[in-house]
């Protein structure tokens, strides 16, 4: 059985420091993609200090397995900066996996406007910002895949 390959393709995976995002990054790398591991750090509910350790660990896993990866620690609302890292390193972007998200485990009646706005910023606006920044690269390269998991 032949395996799907992404040799010489460049993928950005947001929220790739843990959970499904981490697995997406590892799987894409195992299929030959060069991967930008984007993760702001902090907890799943969007609280706590931003940090680089989560993204760095995934990059280390990919590199130690023979793959190519770099970390991007920006918020997904800074999509242009994340895409710029991929283009600076590898000259292109071919795949975007919009996986970043934050958890607000509250019923609709208990959710505050602030919580709602933050969820929208990460899930909706973040996916838009990263995809919008990557789109011209995909068009220019004649190839593109966008996956929205959030």
Image (cartoon, rainbow, N blue to C red):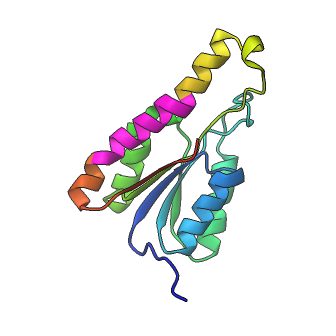
Residue 98 shows in the view: yes
Q: Quadrant of the N terminus?
A: bottom right
Q: Residue at x 45, y 33 (%)?
A: 78
Q: Position of residue 19 (x, y in %)?
A: 72, 52
Q: Is residue 30 left or right of residue 107?
A: left
Q: Is residue 134 above or below residue 125?
A: below
Residue 56 appears in view = no
Q: Is residue 134 left or right of residue 107?
A: left
Q: Quadrant of residue 51?
A: top right
User: Looking at the image, which residue sits at the far bottom?
Assistant: 1
Q: Position of residue 71 (x, y in %)?
A: 55, 52
Q: Which residues are magenta?
A: 122-135
Which residue is drawn at the image coordinates 70% and 11% (left, top)?
Answer: 112
Examine the rendered structure and indicate whether residue 129 appears above or below residue 34: above
The residue at 45%/59% (across/down) is 11
Q: Main secondary structure of the magenta part?
A: helix
Give the residue drawn at x 77%, y 20%: 107
């Amino acid at each position: 059985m032949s395996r799907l390959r992404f040799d010489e393709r460049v993928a950005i995976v947001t929220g790739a420091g843990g959970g499904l995002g981490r697995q997406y990054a590892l799987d894409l790398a195992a299929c030959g993609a060069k991967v930008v591991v984007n993760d702001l750090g902090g907890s799943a509910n969007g609280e706590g200090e931003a940090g680089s350790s989560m993204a760095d660990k995934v990059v280390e896993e990919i590199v130690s397995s023979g793959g190519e990866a770099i970390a991007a620690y920006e918020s997904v609302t800074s999509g242009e900066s994340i895409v710029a890292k991929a283009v600076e390193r590898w000259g292109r972007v071919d795949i975007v996996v919009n996986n970043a998200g934050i958890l607000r485990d509250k019923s609709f009646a208990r959710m505050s406007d602030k919580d709602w706005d933050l969820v929208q910023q990460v899930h909706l606006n973040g996916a838009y910002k990263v995809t919008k920044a990557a789109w011209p690269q995909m068009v220019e390269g004649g190839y593109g895949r966008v996956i929205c998991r959030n």
